[in-house]
Each structure stands twice: as structure tokens, then as C-alpha cells.
Amino acid sequence: MGLRVYTGGTFDLFHVGHVRLLERCREISGQSGTVIVSLNTDEFIEQYKGKPPIISYQDRAEILLSCKYVDQVIPNFGNEDSKPAIVEASPDIIAIGSDWALKDYYKQMDFEQSWLDKLNISLIYIPYTQGISSTEIKARL
């Protein structure tokens, strides 16, 4: 039996870094596991980043669901508080990019390690793909 792996983000301007993150999530979950993406809403992105995404929530969700590594997309309906989406997804593992290793991921997601421990959820870092990001793509345009 595979694992339930959760990751989240905006996934605007889908690129190879996103693909590599999701591919690694699939490897971790196993073929019989489930990869769940918690997708930031357009409203939250605009509130958080001060501007809307290039691609709408509906289109970003469809793009993610077309990726062979993704089984399910749920809205990050808690916005800055990711706990409601995590509880809904009920993952075994939360997978995040290693770029978060130097940031305070716990503060960003509004939970503590003790909360993850209580729910028996592991947090793992996946190597970040250098040289590509939606922000960098937007700068090229």
C-alpha cells in the first residue's frame, strides 16, 4: 500500500521545477500511493503577493491534474493557515522544496512540529531545481 503525499503551492506558469517536485512526490508515494496538491486560490495569491496569478485557479488545477504524477488537487482554502487543507488531505508525508530549508516553513504554514507529530505526518524536503521559477519566467517576459 502506498503513501499519501501532500505538497502545496501556486504552480503558476507550470515548469520543469514543478514537474521534478511532483515526480519526486510520486516516487515517495509509490505507484499505489496518492499525490495531493493543495493549490493556492487566486484570491490568496493576490492577497499574499500583491498581484493575481497569470493563470487562473481553474486552469492551474486542470494543468496539475493532467500531470501523470498528480492524483488529486484541492484548494488551499485556509490561505495562510494550511492546517485545514492538510487535515482534509490526511497525508502521511508533506513534501516541500529544499528552498524552504532556509526559511521558516512552520511559521509560513501556521503550524508547529508538535502538530505534525500529533497527526503522525512527516515533513520532507525535496531538492529544489535551480535556475527556474515562475518569478524568473515572468522576468524573462
Image (cartoon, rainbow, N blue to C red):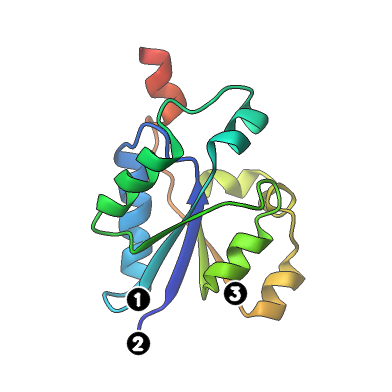
Q: Which residue is mark 2?
A: 1
Between the residue at mark 1 and the residue at mark 2, the CA separation in whole angstroms equals 7 Å
Query: Label 1 vs label 3: CA separation?
Result: 15 Å
Name above or below for residue 15 compared with residue 51: below
10 Å crowding of disc 2: few (<14), some (14-19), many (20+): few
State the image quarter where residue 42 is shown: top right
Q: Name the kind of residue labelled 2 in the image.
A: Met
Residue 24 against residue 15 in the figure, above or below: below
Q: Looking at the image, is mark 1 or mark 2 earlier in the sequence?
A: 2
Instruction: Point out residue 94 in the picture as x, y percentages from the top left corner.
Output: 53, 64
Left or right: where 102 falls relative to 25:
right
Q: Which residue has dot 3 on it?
A: 121
Q: Are the residues tagged 2 and 3 within 8 Å (C-beta)?
A: no
67 sits left or right of 138 in the view = left
Dot 1, crowdedness within 10 Å: few (<14), some or many (≥20)? some
Residue drawn 31% across the image and 67% down it: 27
